[in-house]
Every structure is written in C-alpha cells, then in structure tokens.
Amino acid sequence: MSAVGENIRRIREEIAEAALRSGREPSEIRLMAVTKTVDDKRILEAIEAGVDIMGENYIQEAKRKIEAMDVDVKWHMIGHLQSNKAKYAVRLFDMVHSVDRMGLAAELDKRSAAADRVTDILVEVNVSGEESKSGVRADDAPALVREIARLDNLSIRGLMTMPPWFDDPEDARPYCVALRELKDRIAAEEIPGVEMRELSMGMSGDYRVAVEEGATIVRVGTAIFGARV
C-alpha cells in the first residue's frame, strides 16, 4: 500500500472511532481529499484507496486535473469563488461549498440554468468572525439561505465553515458546535427546497472533533498527501 493509501486507511479508522464516540454511524461521514497543489499521481493513489470526493480551491487547477485524469469521482469547489468564474464552476463541479453572498448565488443560478442543470451548493459561514476569512456572518446566514432558496437552479444542501487554526484541536470544537446549531435552526424553519443535510467542516488538524460535532464531509489534505511543497 502506498503512503497515501496508508494515511487514508488511518484517517478512516479515526473517523469511524470519532463517529462511534458520538453515537453516529461511520457511514454518515464522507472523506474529501483536498488536492490543492497535489500532483496527479498522488491523487490517483487516493482514488485507488477509495476516496471518491476531491476538493479543489482554484478553477484553473481543477479544470486541468479533471480533464487530464478523467476519473469517476466527484469534484467539489471549496475555495473562494469569484462571480465571474461561476460559468466554469457549474460545469466542472458536482457541489460548490463556498457560496457566501447573493450576487454569487444569482450568477451560479443563471449559469446553471444556461447549462440546463441544478447545482448543489453549501452556504459558507464565517463562524469565527475573522476578517481574513470568507463566509456570511452566522447571524446573516438564515436570511441568505431564504433568499437563495428562491432560485430555481440551485439546491442548498447544507453549510460549510473553516474554523481558525489551533495547535489543540479541542479549541476548534466551539466553532463546529456553532455551525451544527445554526444548521438545526435553519432546518427548523422548513424553508421550501432547502435540505440541511450536509455539514462541511473539519480539516487535517481537527477532523476528529468535527466528526464528533456532526460533520458529514471532512476536507483533508495534508494528513493524506503530506505537507504542500
């Protein structure tokens, strides 16, 4: 087994243990391999090890990889997305995690309609309030969800967040809890067309905590592929 494959085996074990600790089924959590700057060979090793969701930050890098590798996996957009790149995003990605404003949602909706498809999206929430991070403020997220829900060619599937980085993963827990509680509040509104099924949270340093607090998608790069070069 390759080093990438061994890392994935270990991570899946830890995800399963975290799920069981919190009374969840391990099958509820999907592992995404974050492939930013990762070469094609190592991505293929991850796919051979069973990972079927790839997360990319940049349109151009994703386009090259998707076309070059031509593999049967899901590609998700996890990076900040400019509205003028929406026309590419709806054709390349199975889900966009980083919708944080109505202008972007409207453009994705328009481009999805032109492509004759409905695009699955997550609303990105800046639960930490850090100025350096994208995402709608938590207090404003329900109103944004209600507004996006009126668009015919987008399907809101849940929420995404990126907590601050901490040496101790336990410090990320309150942010994961905040996103889960926000998801539950929005779900309670029973907004037509909105399904609060997904919580995209947890990365290489804190995915165990994220799983314990309800993550359904964890976005792991370094722990799979090693440090970026």
Image (tube, rainbow, N blue to C red):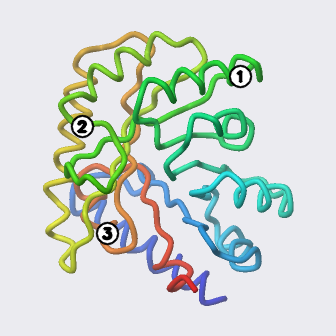
**C-alpha separation, residue under disc 1 versus residue under disc 3:** 37 Å
Residue underneath mark 3: 17
Q: Nearer the viewer, mark 2 or mark 3?
A: 2
Above or below: residue 34 compared with residue 155: below
- Mark 1 or mark 3: whose residue is earlier in sequence: 3
Q: Residue at x 31, y 36 (%)?
A: 136
- Foreground pick, 85 / 176: 85
Above or below: residue 89 compared with residue 119: below
- Foreground pick, 210 / 6: 210
How many other residues sit within 10 Å of disc 1, few (<14), some (14-19) or many (≥20)?
some
How many other residues sit within 10 Å of disc 3, few (<14), some (14-19) or many (≥20)?
some
**C-alpha separation, residue under disc 2 versus residue under disc 3:** 32 Å
**Would residue 207 appear left or right of 90 to someone viewing this image?**
left
- Mark 2 or mark 1: whose residue is earlier in sequence: 1
- Please state, as top left, top right, bottom left or bottom right, where the N terminus lies in the image: bottom right
Q: Amino acid at mark 3?
A: Glu
| Residue 95 makes an appearance in the image | yes
- Mark 2 or mark 3: whose residue is earlier in sequence: 3
Q: Residue at x 50, y 72 (%)?
A: 221
- Please state, as top left, top right, bottom left or bottom right, where the C terminus lies in the image: bottom right
Label 3 SS: helix
Please identify the quarter of the rendering in which residue 169 is found: bottom left
Q: Which mark is residue 197?
A: none
Q: Which mark is residue 117?
A: 1
Residue 137, percent across and down? 24, 37
How many other residues sit within 10 Å of disc 2, few (<14), some (14-19) or many (≥20)?
some
Label 2 SS: strand
Residue underneath mark 2: 137
Label 1 SS: loop
Above or below: residue 73 compared with residue 49: above
**C-alpha separation, residue under disc 2 versus residue under disc 1:** 29 Å
| Residue 1 makes an appearance in the image | no
